Amino acid sequence: MISLKTELEKQLKFSSRNLVTKLVKDDCMNGEEMKKLRQDIHECRLCDLWKTRNNPVVGEGSLTAGVMFIGEAPGYNEDQQGKPFVGRAGKIFDELLSSIELKRKDIYITNILKCRPPGNANPSPEQIKACLPYLDRQIKIIQPNVISTLGNFALSYIFDKFGLKQEKISSVHGRIFTVSNLIGAKKIIPLYHPAAATYNPEMKGLLLEDFKLIRDCL
């Protein structure tokens, strides 16, 4: 007679094997969709930024990440390397991740704009409108449980997308907003942009506190 313990062990092994198979399948499917998206962004001519960029910055990280960070736009270093958050703000971002025991491979990070505005200017409404469909596709591919906005531009769009009242980041940073739509329930955690800590050291302590909410949601 098979013992209850043995049967439970078999069921656990079967469940674990199915979970691993699903994750591998999801990752492969997401990889193909992201590859197509990356190609579309490289070939994009919907606004004038393609004329002045060196490299578009699509995003990076796990394609099955539980948390997705959304910033504003690539800066000089990002434009040079084609990777998000690699300058001074990127170093602070990595420290913030480390403070909650996460690494870049555990999360996904991207921006509202995929190309650097000349002189690091604020994104224009026309540039944002042209680029947002790419961000929407990324959210659909990743399907994160937590969306963390970094700065005002990402905050404004994500709040609008999920039907939340527009607020200043000073009023909503470090709070958890639970929303739902056709792609499932999400938690939104607005944060100050890490770049704020490069010119105001006191902001780093605030960011460290706010990042703890991300850890608690995962």
Image (cartoon, rainbow, N blue to C red):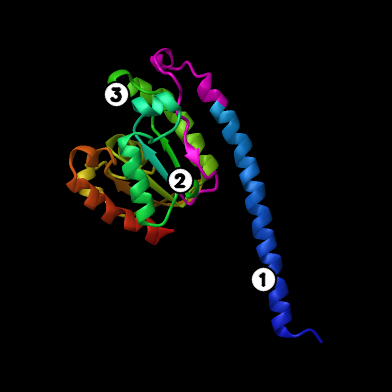
Q: Position of residue 7 (x, y in %)?
A: 73, 78
Circle 2 sits on which residue? 104
Secondary structure of residue under mark 2: helix
Is residue 188 something one can see in this rendering?
A: no
Q: Quadrant of the C terminus?
A: bottom left
Circle 3 sits on which residue? 120
- Residue 12, label in figure: 1
Secondary structure of residue under mark 3: helix
Question: Disc 1 marks which amino acid?
Answer: Leu
Q: Position of residue 159 (x, y in %)?
A: 33, 42
Please give left or right for residue 102 compared with residue 121 in the image.
Answer: right
Q: Are marks 3 and 2 in contact (CB under 8 Å)?
A: no
Q: Position of residue 180 (x, y in %)?
A: 44, 50
Secondary structure of residue under mark 1: helix
Magenta residue span: 39-67
Please give left or right for residue 75 compared with residue 7 in the image.
Answer: left
